[in-house]
Image: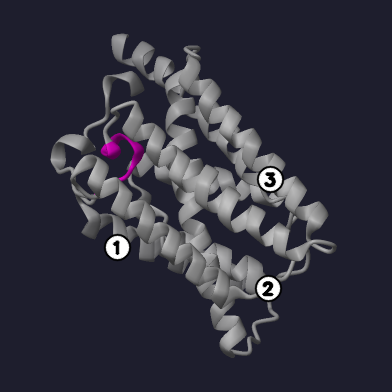
């Protein structure tokens, strides 16, 4: 009986806190940036790109959640940021990615023709770099904090909603994206590691969605230039993290892998 009650409390609870407001508030900032980016993409393309790459992906979506985790003195492992058992997670990552690709191939006859020129490869590289923001912000940061407040099921649902609507500036297939958010959020929650979804499982879905069936997605301009900017930012963020903490985000060891009691 105690086990059943504990399971119910894990799935559903009501313990909102200031941390919950921070996770939700930063999510709404991401939505606002996406909406503004969409309005400016035709008339002010450079400003639109800066809003996405610098403000959304860089500052609010990556640097802020990492800073907040450090500021609250939480364990990186509790947010799926660890390398413990990475071999197993990556194997499953490849398997899930292969299964997803098979589903795409069986469910759609095409088009599969891609011109592998410099621009296409640049777009693929940019998409994979942008995916780090999605994994860190939505599945690592938001989902974990929402789970502490509301339980597993509401956390996955709320995170999927934020994930879906953050595309409003460049893709409006919200129902499909909500289902994608549910898929990645559920798999991440079951494994407790970002390495279960990134890079292969997430990458297959993102690359197929943007580069194969890109019917409602704004084109990516200057992908190599923007990718270089993201790399520079990420390198600076990692350098900052090492100086502040004295270690990499993914080197905390077995102790950080254990789920905190607040998740139960």
Which residue is labeled 1 in the image?
91
In the image, what residue occupies the spot 68% across and 78% down?
109
Is the C-beta separation of discs 1 and 3 under 8 Å?
no
Q: Which image quadrant for residue 2?
A: top left
Q: Is residue 150 above or below residue 29?
A: above
Q: Give yes or no for residue 93 being in the magenta stretch.
A: no
- Mark 3 surroundings: few (<14), some (14-19) or many (≥20) residues within 10 A: many
User: Is label 2 or label 1 in front?
Assistant: 2
Please indicate whether residue 157 sits to the left or right of residue 202 in the image: right
> How far apart are the two marked residues, 2 and 1, measured between alpha carbons?
33 Å
Residue 221 tag number: 2
Q: Give yes or no for residue 81 being in the magenta stretch.
A: yes
Which residue is labeled 3 in the image?
33
In the image, what residue occupies the spot 50% across and 58% down?
131
- Mark 2 surroundings: few (<14), some (14-19) or many (≥20) residues within 10 A: some
Provide residue 236's location: percent of width, then percent of height: 37, 57
Q: Quadrant of the N terminus?
A: top left
Q: Looking at the image, is mark 1 or mark 3 earlier in the sequence?
A: 3
| Residue sitting nearer the eye, 45 or 28 | 45
Q: In this view of the protein, can residue 103 be seen by the observer?
A: no
Is the C-beta separation of discs 2 and 1 under 8 Å?
no
């Amino acid at each position: 009986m105690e086990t059943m009650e504990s399971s119910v409390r894990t799935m559903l609870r009501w313990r909102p806190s200031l941390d919950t407001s921070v996770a939700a508030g930063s999510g709404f900032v991401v939505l606002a940036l996406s909406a503004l980016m969409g309005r400016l993409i035709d008339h002010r393309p450079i400003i639109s790109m800066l809003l996405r790459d610098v403000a959304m992906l860089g500052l609010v979506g990556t640097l802020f959640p990492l800073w907040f985790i450090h500021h609250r003195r939480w364990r990186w492992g509790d947010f799926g940021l660890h390398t413990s058992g990475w071999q197993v997670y990556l194997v499953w990552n490849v398997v899930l990615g292969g299964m997803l690709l098979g589903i795409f191939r069986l469910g759609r006859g095409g088009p599969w023709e891609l011109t592998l020129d410099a621009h296409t490869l640049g777009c693929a590289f940019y998409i994979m770099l942008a995916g780090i923001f999605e994994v860190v912000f939505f599945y690592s940061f938001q989902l974990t904090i929402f789970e502490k407040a509301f339980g597993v099921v509401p956390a996955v649902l709320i995170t999927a909603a934020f994930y879906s609507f953050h595309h409003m500036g460049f893709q409006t297939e919200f129902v499909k994206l909500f289902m994608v958010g549910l898929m990645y959020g559920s798999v991440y929650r079951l494994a407790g590691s970002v390495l279960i979804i990134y890079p292969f499982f997430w990458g297959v879905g993102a690359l197929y969605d943007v580069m194969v069936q890109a019917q409602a997605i704004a084109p990516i301009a200057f992908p190599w230039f923007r990718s270089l900017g993201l790399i520079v930012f990420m390198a600076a963020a990692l350098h900052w993290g090492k100086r502040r903490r004295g270690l990499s985000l993914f080197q905390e060891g077995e102790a950080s892998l254990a789920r905190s009691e607040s998740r139960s």
